[in-house]
Amino acid sequence: MDTKLIEELTLKLNHQKASLEKELASFAVEDKKVKGNWDAKRVNNEDSDMEEKADEVEEYDNLLSLEHSLELKLKNVNAALEKITRSTSSGQAAGSYGTCEKCGKQIETDRLQVAPEAQLCMNCNK
Ligand SMILES: [Zn+2]
């Protein structure tokens, strides 16, 4: 893979990582014991009446599902960055990064430009 492209994609991945972490940190706390695991902060307002409490529970449920999808995306971004770091330190050009995890073919450059954390090629992602 082209070194220039790798550099560009690494930059994008680092950017994504930073914004995902920032978004997560706005409503969740990172688990100190389990790396990459985040927990949504629970809104606990003692003064709320029954109806408000129900709203808070619903809001918490929404936050949880948002937290899960952001966490998953962050995991993929980190995995991609790790692949790049591992291969550049061993002297290979990006190693397994950019290779489809299912069929082993090179993932389309267009696809990586849009989703640098992609682990499957367009064909396998269908
Ligand atoms: Zn594939």
Image: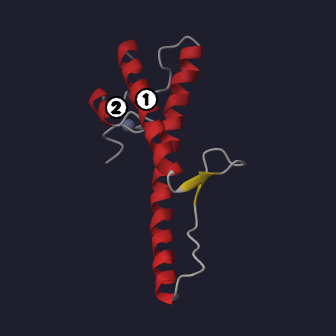
Q: In which quarter of the image is residue 3?
A: top left
Q: Can residue 103 be seen in this view?
A: no
Q: Where is residue 39 in the image (x, y as percent from the top left)?
A: 59, 58
Q: 42 and 33: which one is in front? A: 42
Q: Quadrant of residue 91?
A: top right
- Residue lying furthest top in this view? 91
Q: In this view, does 117 lie to the left or right of 122?
A: right
Query: Relative to residue 3, is residue 113 depicted above or below?
Result: below
Residue 112, disc: 2
Q: Position of residue 42 (x, y in %)?
A: 58, 67
Query: Relative to residue 39, is residue 102 depicted above or below?
Result: above
Comes first in the chain, label 1 or label 2:
1
Residue in view at x 53 percent, y 27 percent: 83
**Picture mark count:** 2
Residue in view at x 65 percent, y 44 percent: 35
- Residue lying furthest front in this view? 47
User: In which of the image's four quarters is ligand 1 placed?
Assistant: top left
Disc 1 designates what residue?
99
Distance between the Cα atoms at labels 1 and 2?
A: 10 Å
